[in-house]
Image (cartoon, helix red, strand yellow):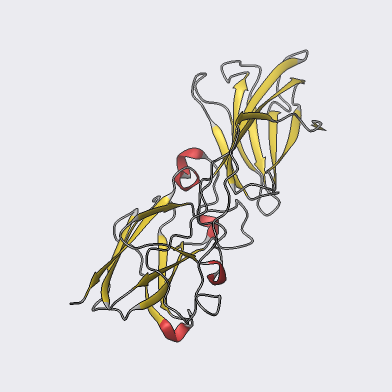
Amino acid sequence: MSRLAPHALILLSAFTAVGCIELGKDDDGDGDGGALLEPTLHECTPVVPETLGGLITVEMDHAGEVLTDFVAPADRQTGLLTFSLVSPRSDDDLVTMGLTLEHPDLSTFQIEIDVQPNEGVALAGVAAPGETLVMGLAEWGRGLPGPEGLYTAEAAWTWTEYDDCYEPNNTAAEARHVPTGVEHTAWMVSTLGVSEEPTDWYRFTIAEDSVVNLSMAFPESIPMWVELYAGDRSEENNVFYSWFSEVPGEYAWQSEGPLPAGTYSLRLAPFVGVQVYDTPLRPYAPHLYEPYTFRIDATPAR
């Protein structure tokens, strides 16, 4: 087994630095009381996604393996790493190639490339800033006849940053304020690891007593759990929590009556455990490629 020296990164699309906006807070600075927040406040820091890519080219011997580290940029947001085989394809009876993707908190994911020659197969993983994933390129021919000499094997990888303007918002203290009457887009899964449950927090404000509606759309592979809090987000101020959505990929809720004017906190998280949706095979993991959306509407009770 050999490990490649750190390979050069190829910048596919450069990013443009965007200045951070100042986050609005109420009088005590934490959004839990004091002056009423402006309902139109939008705590969104725009992101121009960065994309990196590279090609691993190696002279492979029979039953050989090469491991290559990918380290996500520490100064950017979470991004999606996709790792796919270029050559040789599986139509060569003497060469059966495989890919692996390793994460320190998870077992090694692997797939044998035994599909049709032109069919693309890829592994994908979410990498948090500064996180390392290990990409493996191997010939799975140990104990079987194979090529007598060296041959060239190639695998391509790309990393694309998520354009989530509400991160970081993984805790109640980091909740970002969003205006009502507007659809918002974000990404739920923040790492391939299982050390922390993915959670997104938001705040919104209604200036007068109103009936509140929440609508959501999300990848079917991560049905969402919703909790709504008033004021200081303590358990006694819980307005509601959701049950499992009967419609895959959708959720809708309406308050039974008008909610009092004020600022509310919204907690969104996967309804199921992390182990259910950490599979990195593309056909089974649309949540890695698809964001979720939500919208809050408030109708004054006049």
The picture quadrant where one finds residue 82 is: top right
Instruction: Residue at 41%, 71% (x, y): give it.
Output: 227
Asked if residue 26 is positioned above or below residue 181 in the image, the reply reads below
Quadrant of the snapshot with the C terminus: bottom left
Q: Is residue 217 visible to us here?
A: no
Camera-side residue of 99 and 125: 125
Instruction: Residue at 33%, 79% (x, y): give it.
Output: 261
Residue 254 left/right relative to 89: left
Farthest-out residue, bottom: 236
Camera-side residue of 228 and 183: 183
Instruction: Residue at 60%, 22% (x, y): give it.
Output: 86
Where's residue 270, x and y in %?
Answer: 46, 61
Where's residue 130, x and y in %?
Answer: 70, 49
Camera-side residue of 174 and 17: 17
Instruction: Residue at 70%, 34% (x, y): give it.
Output: 136
Quadrant of the snapshot with the N terminus: top right
Residue 168 left/right relative to 231: right
Where's residue 137, x and y in %?
Answer: 69, 30
Where's residue 116, x and y in %?
Answer: 49, 21
Asked if residue 163 is positioned above or below residue 158 in the image, the reply reads below
Please state the total of marks drawn on the protein image: 0
Residue 165 left/right relative to 62: left
Q: Is residue 209 visible to us here?
A: yes
